[in-house]
Image (cartoon, coloured by chain):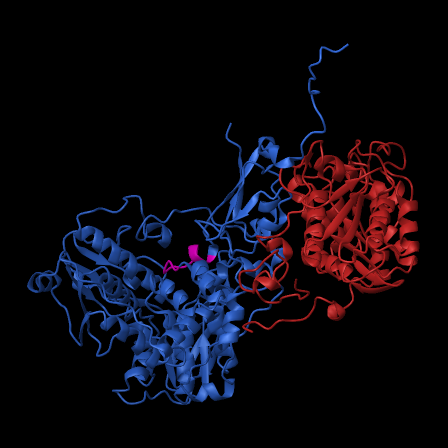
Chain colours: A blue, B red
Amino acid sequence: MSSGTRTTPFAITLDVGSSRANLTGSWRTERPQYARLTAPCGAGCPAAEDVQQWLYHAEEGGYEAAWRRIMERNPFPAISGRICYHPCETACNRAQLDAAVGINSVERFLGDQALAKGWQIEPAQLLGTGGRVLVIGAGPSGLSAAYHLALLGHHVTVRDMAPAAGGMMRYGIPKYRLPREILDAEIQRIAELGVDFQLGAHVSDLIAERAAGGYDAVFLAVGATLPQRTYIPAGSAARIIDAIALLRNAEDGSAGPPLLGRRVTVYGGGNTAMDAARTAKRLGAEESIVVYRRDREHMPAHESELMEALQEGIKVKWLTTITEAGAGEITVERMELDEHGYPQPTGQFERLGADTVVLATGQVSDLSLLEGMPGIELEDRVVRVDGNMMTGHPGIFAGGDMVPAERTATVAIGHGRRAAHGIDRWLRGETGNPEWGLHDSASATGVGPVPQTAQVPFERLNTWYFSDAPRTVREQLDAIRRTSTFDEVVLGLDEANALFEARRCMSCGNCLACDNCYGVCPDNAVVKLDPPGAYAYAFDLDYCKGCGLCAQECPCGAIEMLPEPI
Amino acid sequence: MSATRLKYFQTGSFAAGNRLVDPDQRSVQSDPGRANAITCGHRACQGCGEALGARYALDAAMRATGGDLIATNATGCLEVFSTPYPESSWQLPWIHSLFGNAAAVATGVAAALKAKGNTHTRVVGQGGDGGTVDIGFACLSGMFERGDDVLFICYDNEAYMNTGVQRSAATPPAAYTSTTQAVGDEPGATWGQGKSVPLIALAHEIPYVATATIADLRDLERKVQTAMEVRGARYIHVLVTCPLGWGAASADSIKLARLATETGIFPVWEGEHGDVVSVTKIRHQTPVEEYLKLQTRYRHLFLPARREDIIERIQARADRNIARFGLLEAADDDPLDLQVEAGS
């Protein structure tokens, strides 16, 4: 018999349990982690624009936010959107998929929107510590430096010999590439920050001027305005002019329209040669021929410039040098490239009709201002600077075409910003990182701790996820019409096209909140954060098994798999 | 749920969601309130395609029915990894009976609901390829033939993975399994062509049949939604990757399913009442080799000597699918192909 006490069996039908009791995170040998990596566009931008970040705003129609992101780095979106040779697009990963994102045209759209809508930058509250800075040269580099210095709270004076600000953007780049109302409007915005412009003013003694004006620092950005003469034996009746003088003359018109004659020959193969040939055509030349000593492959002019010139009927004589210039006629010699790509004479001569020869064989900086200044070091007719853009003379900084770097407006704009921050640091008694060099990535040496992360290679993206979308081509003015006028050649995008173009961005290395990681996790171990934290999602490491699907299926390569810490 | 291919919005509708479009145009899987029909802690392998496919399908069915859904399950990986007694991963009423009778149990559940006058609760039967193509085939065919009000979903990973990777009638030719070893002149599975249950289901002339993969989430969700809008016997056959049985990296699960469709090896289509009514076109046609070489179950086709003859035979099968289903023709009749203009 039983003792009368009833014992409960060990188990009677177990309670319902949930598999959530099983923490599968313990299986993991690798863990996913969200990352923000450097997209190649931004890394490739000489003005250090964070292109991927401003495109992110533009993609959602946040044009003003996008424009303000550009303005943090570059005060000239409407100008750069027209004249920049867009190394961002050269670097763009989308080029390997179909065609690069038309970053330049979106930038122009944003810049034009800002002008149309009157978006303004708030002037800085002038700090008590604000220094006095003299900027010499009102080209892209000087203006960029003035803008950033003003926003950093310094008193800035910009001085330039020319009657109007803009430098080569006004006196080198023709109107059909950069309409002057755009140039004026973006410069005006800098003036409204309280920058003092002294135009038509020459500086001859830098040290005396600096002392007299009580300037704590000076930024030199005098450009490269002197033609580099190429000697051509010429008869007294030959008419030879410099490209830079032709372009300047076409701009200010003070000397009346240049007399070019019917047949113009431009000597050189750079962008200035293209500008000069196209300008000559617009000034009435029936024939405008570019003579260049090497071939198309070795031509320094940008492909788009050459293409537009050819479309306008400009002819190019490749592998040719001018050996003699006479009245209405020149003698040219055919060249051959040797194994190093250098042109060698062949002894075959030819005569060409030419009423004017325009020399576009390079420009040099006028460095007379620096003669005898202690500490200044020259290098191949330009001025040596450190990573802060300071010359060997304390407090004298330099940038743009007068320092050893590629000579483009965008590089100059980047120099201006770096110099502004360099000057700001110097005025506060701080030194920059001595390891910075002039050619280091602009984003790495700019203001603030921008971590220099690895760039995102194309292979890291999962391009399956991106819609097939051909690039929007900006309309071009009818070639016939544009050769007779100085109207702008390349037209802008309308809003629908700009939005479309922005949305072609693949957001390399940066989350675009597509929910794919959240969708593809077989273990529901991706959590959507509402509101988003540092990232839009987080990993639930209690359950993440480390399969790596999220990283593999992330369209933009913004998830890394790291070995599990043991 | 949207049945629209969104164009020109960065990731369009290829990714689960898209911050640029309204929430109702995103997938069920991008919804923070999705049912998570299989919750965390299940014991499926890393990168399991079946766990993913079952959640995709059932979450879509849960949304389509407002959560008023009962699932029956055949024996197999899905059953084993989700329900080690007394734990369960299922977030809906779920019943497992035998390996071969999931369709019959579903029939019974549907009949019982009808007997009780319940016209709102819906029934899904589900199983792997073993429980569908082999062991449960007679029950499934009967269910089709009787027109029972059940959506049966097969998660096809092409072998009996749970018990140690034995060959099933869905195992493709030349694939290694533990019962089709890579030995002899004809290494791997020698039985010719496997068995296409979707085409057999189509031959039953039931109202709706579709194939899908875990690589095209929107397409799978749309097909489940469509199936739930129809009454009667319906069948969806989902290709799901098995990293263990296929010998593939766990991170490649979706990529492999994508390659299976982009090569033509696994045609994705839907049919109604005996006719194929639409196919998903190949976006970037890819040689079968790209698919095969990522899986050790096909390693013997490349090592120690390359078996060009077998690779060519597999390519020929893929090419036949492409021709038969018109997988490369212009995509203008894609039901998802309604263009949404940028900015609208």
Pick the front one: A224 or B247: B247
Q: Decide: is A366 above or below B80.
A: below
Q: Decide: is A308 above or below A402.
A: below
Q: Is residue A47 magenta?
A: yes
Residue A344 location (% of width, % of height): 47, 63
Residue A428 location (% of width, % of height): 17, 50
Image quadrant occupied by the N terminus of chain B: bottom right
Residue A63 left/right relative to B302: left
Residue A101 location (% of width, % of height): 52, 65
- Quadrant in the picture for residue B156: top right
Q: Is residue A474 visible?
A: yes
Residue A282 left/right relative to B22: left
Check the image and name the residue furthest to the left.
A212
Question: Which secondary structure dominates the residues rendered in magenta?
Answer: loop
The residues colored magenta run: A41-49
Q: Decide: is A228 above or below B213.
A: below
